Image: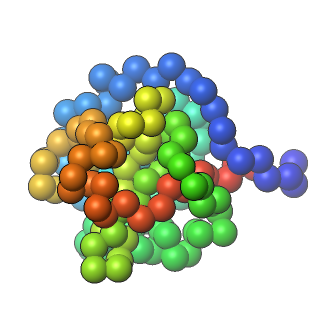
Amino acid sequence: MGLLVWLKVELNLQIEKYLNIPYLPDGCDFDGTDCYGIIRLIYRNELSCSLPPFASSTEDSLINQLVEQNICLTETLQNPEPYCIVTFRENNLVSHMGMVLNDTRYFIHNSAKRQRSTRERLDHPYWSQHIGNFLRWKMH
């Protein structure tokens, strides 16, 4: 099938099973994830979509590699939608990412700072000042 279809789904994601997963650089399973790994885990388990792996020595370079090399695989959205990727910028570079939930006021992410996956509000003073883009992944 040669047509690209934009990922747009409404699922009843049971987010609780994805909370409190330990932080693990380059991880993408329930034993541990990084910020991109939690997105890969949810997409694989809930959407039957395998996102490409990106191995790197630092989370920041992994995120920028993902955004720079695969921008053609995503569509930039004006507003958050369920299951879209939200990127966060610091010093004009993408430094973190998460996935927007069904209630689009919230996102899930995993970070070295928190050492576990958490659900947070997009309008939190810290996160709202650092939002970069909302991206929807293309599916074949």
Q: Residue at x 63, y 32 (%)?
A: 9
Which quadrant of the view contains residue 14?
A: top left
**Whole-percent x, y for residue 6 in the image:** 71, 47
Asked if 129 appears above or below 79 in the picture, the reply is below
**Whole-percent x, y for residue 37 in the image:** 37, 50
Observer-nearest of 128 and 111: 128
User: Could you tell me if residue 115 is visible in this image?
Assistant: yes
- Residue pushed farthest right? 2
Q: Residue at x 60, y 60 (%)?
A: 76
User: Could you tell me if residue 40 is visible in this image?
Assistant: no
Q: How is the image coloured?
A: rainbow
**Whole-percent x, y for residue 89 in the image:** 33, 69
Left or right, residue 67 beside residue 23: right
Q: Residue at x 20, y 33 (%)?
A: 20
Left or right, residue 116 beside residue 58: left
Observer-nearest of 25 and 128: 128
Q: Residue at x 38, y 37 (%)?
A: 105
**How many marks on residues?**
0
